Amino acid sequence: CDAFVSHSWHDDATAKWEALQEWRSCFQAEHGREPQIWLDKFCIDQSNIEADLRCLPVYLSGCSSLVILCGPTYLSRLWCIIEIFTYIMMGGSVEDIDVRLVLREGHTNEDKTA
């Protein structure tokens, strides 16, 4: 896995998609291929979330980097902070964390100060 994607479910989906696509373009330019990502919506059984979340340390340690889609609510969500903490505790490096701002169109200044 090239990257574990961390995001807040409460941030704007379109803005998160745009931030993820920007990261993807940079990854492709550097590596010459599509990235392999871990994304909760697709990698966790949404009907049995609790069971899969017990494996969070394994999921994070299996990824080379942590991509943070940081929108206005990201830092206020305890689960998001737990993902960062777990990544570091499982041996991830701060240098391998890529923070991408999630800014809604027409609300850029508001989102930057949130």
Image: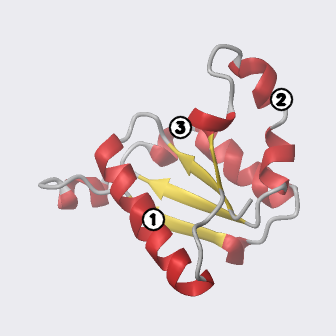
Residue visible at 78% across and 51% down in the picture? 60
Give the residue pinned by disc 2: 54
Query: Label 3: which residue?
Result: 77
Residue 1 lies, in percent from the top left, at: 74, 59
Name the side, left or right, on which 3 lies relative to 74: right
Tag 2: residue type?
Arg
Image mark for residue 100:
1
- Most distant residue in the left direction: 106
Mark 2 or mark 3, which has the lower sequence index? 2
Q: Secondary structure at mark 3?
A: loop
Q: Nearer the viewer, mark 2 or mark 3?
A: 2
Asked whether disc 2 touches disc 3, contact meaning CB atoms under 8 Å apart, the reply is no
| Mark 1 or 3: the one toward you | 1
Asked if the residue at tag 3 contacts the one at tag 1, i.e. Cβ–Cβ closer than 8 Å, the answer is: no
Looking at the image, tell me whether mark 1 or mark 2 is earlier in sequence order: 2
| Depicted 96 relative to depicted 110: above or below | below
Front position in the image: 85 or 58: 58
